[in-house]
Amino acid sequence: MSSAPSSAALGANDFPAYRGRMEYVCLGCGQRFGVDRLLYTCPSCGDVFLLQDTEFGRLKETPGAAWREIFDARAATKRDALRGIFRFYELTAPVVEPGDIVWLGEGNTPIVESSPALRAQLGGQRMAFKNDGQNPSASFKDRGMACAFSFLRSLMREKQMKSLLAVCASTGDTSAAAALYASYVGGGISSVVILPQGKVTPQQLAQPLGSGATVLEVPGVFDDCMKVVEYLADNYDVALLNSKNAWRILGQESYAFEVAQWADWDLSGLCVFVPIGNAGNITAIMSGFLKLCELGIIARPPRIFGVQSHHADPVYRYYAQEPGARTFAPVTVQASVAQAAMIGSPVSFPRVRHFAEKIEKLAGPGSFQVVQVSEQEIIEGMLLANRHGHISCTQGGECMAGLIKARELGLIDKDETAVLDATAHMLKFIGFQDMYFSDAFPPEFGITPNKELANAPEAVISAEEKAALSPADFTVKTAENIVKRLGLARK
Ligand SMILES: *Cc1c(COP(=O)(O)O)cnc(C)c1O
Ligand SMILES: [Zn+2]
């Protein structure tokens, strides 16, 4: 077997020699299972899994500083297999062979510092958005999907499987990502997505349709779809692509690795804000930072702030109770502009509890917190960010609102740097901006638009006027109308 990696021995373009040995570990009863098959929940107790590399200890033979050099060098790689989430191959899924790795441009998304005006408006708060909407299907879900599909490819090759049906329930973005990767990979993998009717945006619906996936609609909300998909995965021969699938969590850890690398591996004074829906993303981000700590690549994890809407806040409610006397209860969700996080019974809640405890043990009280924000604050958080040159979706707006709330509650100092997860591209959720600008929110959202923020196109000349004018006169008349509207001074 290969020896521990060292920066000197490993060029940026060499595929890592290290291979781990991965097992599913049940978070409930601790039983372990081999990864030669697809498992989502424990056959003994029904709890969720994490994936663990039982060889991980060997990675500690390489000092943290050497790992930092390896990952910094690899950032310049010319190998597609190492360009995305597998830049951090040894920490991710080191059982997948290079030929099985799928890379569609995911990962390595920009972290853009707050515009100066926004920073001033937030009382000097240091802040940056990580634009995960710049992934190929325009959300962070691509990170997990790249890992899940790379593993599916290796499994199908090893087991000589000819075909595989991949299913997922979705609030919109999981299905867009699953359909994208399935249509690219082909090779007998086909994708079926199950969506809550009318609860995904037109843009999100267009994505799996365009990728050629089978799209099935169910009346209700995400939680209803998830139960159907779980029934299918428990009883029929299908591959589940929801974040119950622990391979997706591994891929999503790359977000944490990238934030750490952006901070030049020094996370003191850093606070990471993440919207919580099904809780897979915040699970992965905490797990990722903890791995970096374990290998001495970073000295301490950043502080983690989960953010939830008052219309879908089961994780907030759990942590609002006194430590030691907390009980978890699902909630019935209400309409939310943070629709991708509108989940009342998060599948990954046990994982959150598991990792939050570890973060708190390492970094002390206050290192993991959940804040609650209103629908009004979420949409206005998004508008505030985007009016300052950012490209935040409503869930990114939820992070923005969460940061403002954390400031109000005295949980964060302006000299700490907040990294906000813009989990998708703004254009996926642009209908909510339209509803705000045109004052068209149904009452159940509880949002009253501030008229001063409304923005709408203005006509400068009518079609009838145009018809009555020669082309040359039309140009002049239109231009003169614009001069009046803007009050332009002649040169
Ligand atoms: C899925 C999703 C979320 C919620 O992430 P979880 O892992 O379910 O907590 C937030 N924002 C966007 C844009 C998403 O697609
Ligand atoms: Zn179990």
Image (spheres, helix red, strand yellow):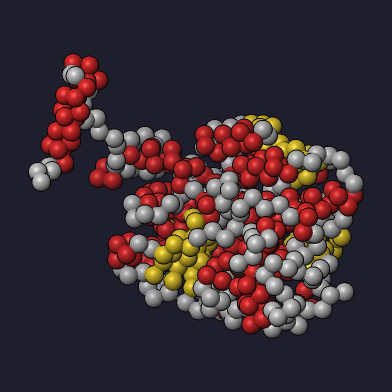
Toward the left, the furthest residue is: 490
Q: Residue 446: x percent and y percent? A: 39, 43
Q: Is the residue 107 above or below the residue 295 in the image?
A: above
Q: Residue at x 43, y 74 (%)?
A: 416
Determine if residue 29 is in view: no
Quarter of the N terminus within the rendering: bottom right
Toward the front, the furthest residue is: 472
Q: Residue 484: x percent and y percent? A: 12, 37
Q: Picture quarter containing residue 9?
A: bottom right
The residue lying toward the viewer, choosing from 31 and 399, is 399
Q: Is the residue 451 above or below the residue 458 in the image?
A: below
429 with respect to 214 (left or right): left
Determine if residue 474 is in view: yes
Q: Residue at x 33, y 43 (%)?
A: 448
Q: Residue at x 61, y 53 (%)?
A: 105
The residue lying toward the viewer, choosing from 300 and 116, is 116
Q: Is the residue 158 above or below the residue 370 in the image?
A: above
Q: Residue 322: x percent and y percent? A: 55, 69
Q: How many marks?
A: 0
Q: Residue 40: x percent and y percent? A: 77, 52
The residue lying toward the viewer, choosing from 136 and 248, is 136
325 with respect to 471 (left or right): right
Q: Residue at x 73, y 44 (%)?
A: 185
Q: Is the residue 304 above or below the residue 203 in the image?
A: below
